[in-house]
Every structure is written in C-alpha cells, then in structure tokens.
Image (cartoon, rainbow, N blue to C red):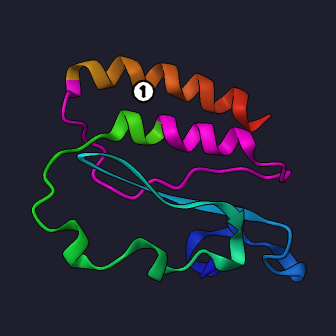
Amino acid sequence: MFSKLGPAFDPGEGGAAGLAGGAIITGQGVTTKMELGPLETLAADKLGSQKDYARQTSRDLVNGINAAIAMLKTATTARKAIVYIGDGADTNPDAAREQMRSLRLDAGRAHR
C-alpha cells in the first residue's frame, strides 16, 4: 500500500506500527468512515462499496478538508498528512476558493 503513495508515507523498516490514519468521505456532507487509529487497520474495506456512492453528486470539499484538518490536529505522530482523492471541486466553487486558502494555513499550523 505505501509504495504507491510515495516516500512521504513510507513507514520505513518498522512498518506501520505507531502510525495513525483515518478515512473521511465527502459528497452530500461529510462522513467519517474510520476515526483516527492505527494505520495498519486502514484498508479499502473501510470505504464501503461502489453502491454506497451511487447517485451522490454533491461535493463538500471544504467541509471534508476541514474535518480532515480537525482529525490531523488530534494525531500525536511526528509525520502528518492529508491525502485527498477527488476532482477538487466543491458544490460552491466561488466560496470554496477563498475558504481553501484559509484551510491551507490552518493545515500548516496543524502539521507542526
């Protein structure tokens, strides 16, 4: 799993022990699929199936990133990251542009 995410997520020789991860899904609102927990327990089955996402056309990018930052702030691990998989669109693109700038700064503060 880690080799596909790149060296920033490579847990090294110790494996994923001691690392944390979580899963947040956005669509019509924000759904936490897995609370922050041991990274080795984060797997594709935590995301559900394609049927779970059928007919979801709303995009709640800003609230999803905000939820991810809140989760990141609770992490006690030395390395922290948010991996976003999506098209980068929000249902309200004009407002999202400015909100994402603010969230970028908040994420930087949470990373320290």
11 left or right of 86 in image: right
The residue under the point 24% across, 71% down is: 52
Residue 47, given in percent of the width and then of the height, sits at 41, 72
The residue under the point 70% across, 64% down is: 37
Q: What's the magenta bit mostly, secondary-structure-wise? A: loop
Reply yes or no: does residue 72 show up in magenta: yes
The kind of secondary structure element at disc 1 is helix
The residue under the point 80% across, 34% down is: 112
For label 1, the crowd category at 10 Å Cα-Cα, with few meaning under 14, some 14 to 19 and many 20 or more, is: some
79 left or right of 43 in image: right
The residue under the point 71% across, 26% down is: 109
Residue 96, given in percent of the width and then of the height, sits at 31, 25
Q: How many marks?
A: 1
Reply yes or no: does residue 84 show up in magenta: yes
- Which kind of residue does numbered mark 1 sit on? Met
**Farthest residue, direction left:** 55
Q: Nearer the viewer, residue 63 or 11?
A: 63
Residue at the disc numbered 1? 100
Query: Quarter-wise, where is residue 70 in the image?
Result: top right
Residue 90, given in percent of the width and then of the height, sits at 25, 37
Residue extent of the magenta highlight: 66-93
User: Eyeballing the image, is 46 above or below 67?
Assistant: below
Residue 103, given in percent of the width and then of the height, sits at 51, 26
